[in-house]
Every structure is written in C-alpha cells, then in structure tokens.
Image (cartoon, helix red, strand yellow):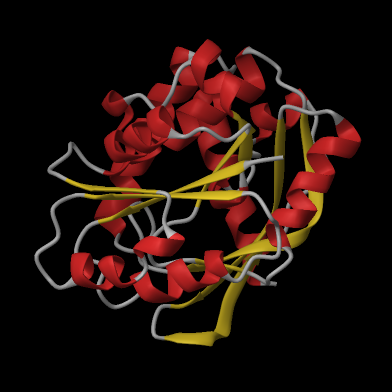
Amino acid sequence: MKISIVTVVFNGLEFIEDCILSLAAQDHLTIEHIVIDGGSTDGTIEVIHKYLKQISYFCSEKDQGLYDALNKGIAVATGEVLGILHADDCFADWGVLSAVADCFNVNQCEAVYGNLNFIQRHSPAMSRRKWVSKVYSRKDLRRGWMPAHPTLFLKKELFLSLGGYLLNYGSSADYELILRYFYRYRIHAVFLDRVLVNMKLGGLSNGSFRKRSRAAVYDYKALSTHEVPYPFLVLLLKRVRKVRQFF
C-alpha cells in the first residue's frame, strides 16, 4: 500500500529537518513525501533541498494558507492513502506508517486515526498533554468528539468523491471535513490504539485566546452546515473534552 504524506510549510526553518527525517525513518516501504512550501524566506527551502532525494514532490509558491496548500498536495498525491505531517510535527516512532497500512488492509476501511501527544515546542521530550481517542459511533460527533486531525489517514478516493478542505472555514477547515466525512457521509473509520504523532504546541488554532475564539466561530459554522443538533452545546462539549487531555 502506497501512503502519500503531505507536509505544508512556511518559514519553518527551526523544525522542517526533524519533520523530514521523521518520515524518512519510517520502515514502511512505499511512501510518497509531498512538500508544499508557501514561499519561505528564512532558509527553509535550502534545508528542503538537502533532502530532495527523500522527497517525491516539492514546490514553493504563494498560497492562500494551510488548507489551500494541503489541497495542492492532495491533488498531486499518487498514494492509495493520504496523511498529513505538519512541518513542526513528527511521527511518534519508526513503525507508524506500517501500523497504519496494516490497519487499512485488515479492516478494509476508508480511514484510520489514532492517538496524539502534545509536546513542548522547544522541549520535545516533554509531553504537555495527550489526546487519547477511542472507537467512535456517529452520535459521538453530536457530543463534541472528533479524531485528532494530525493522526487521520484517509483513502484518496474520499477526496475525489467528497471534496477536499474548504477554505471558507478558516482554521476549522479540518473540523468541517471531519464532520462532512464522518457525520454526513458516515465513512468507515477505524481507531488504531497507539500514538501516531507528536504535535508541537502553538499551531494554527491552539495557543492564544484570539485564535481559540476565532476557531469556535468557524466550528459553529461547520456544525450548522452539517445540521448537527444543538451546535452551541456541541461546542461546549468539544471544549470540555480537551480537559481530559491534561490527565
């Protein structure tokens, strides 16, 4: 099974090398690494050029942000399965993609998701909190549940049939896509009970109060679009669920 991994980066000099090496260390035999750069000026491109032999596709050009760049990467991907590895994140261990491929093969599913560690941005050995997921049912999405997006692997055919990331949902474009796939179209997704990704804190939608407030507005829009009952309550439950990540 060929797995395509899309990495989007813009001025990510500090972490891009670790990201690339994390993927290069995977023991799965058939991997396609697609790197989409937004026109970096800080030396990121020079680092990427050092590893072009490990990268299947690379382009650098201005875009409309993270999700526009992800759509560009998805469009050129040739793998049966697609995953995302953000430029400042790493896979949890060298066997992640083999485990994901096995899960797809055994379950004949359309999606696989797992657990996530949030780590200190400048102290990778320090885990701040853990996103431990579970086997889900559709009603869980009405109770604020969602899979950790960085751990989500999807069959490429889903993007072709159900569409990619919608840019008018801002930093919640991933949540809208999850609601569209999991809630509206009820795809067959399987939980893989292992940590798949170590995610550094301080990304697009976590961090400042302003970021979180803006994300909540887009979350509400996504919930309303897909007619999830009681969207205000779902938003509250979604926030409450995050408390568990600290224990």
At a point 44% along the width and 76% down the height, the residue shown is: 18
At a point 79% along the width and 28% down the height, the residue shown is: 109
Can residue 230 be seen here?
no
At which x and y percent is residue 88?
39, 67
Q: Nearer the viewer, residue 210 or 16?
A: 16
Q: Is residue 58 above or below residue 227?
A: below
Q: Nearer the viewer, residue 118 or 57?
A: 57
Residue 99 placement: quadrant: bottom right
At which x and y percent is residue 241?
63, 51
| Quarter of the C terminus within the rendering | bottom right
Q: Is residue 73 left or right of residue 93?
A: left
Q: Is residue 48 above or below residue 124?
A: above
Q: Is residue 187 left or right of residue 151?
A: right
Q: How many marks?
A: 0
Can residue 105 be seen here?
yes
At a point 49% along the width and 73% down the height, the residue shown is: 21
At which x and y percent is residue 70?
36, 39
Residue 40 placement: quadrant: bottom left
| Quarter of the N terminus within the rendering | top right
Residue farthest to the left?
41
At which x and y percent is residue 150?
54, 51
Q: Is residue 186 above or below residue 124?
A: above
At a point 61% along the width and 51% down the height, the residue shown is: 151
Residue farthest to the right?
106
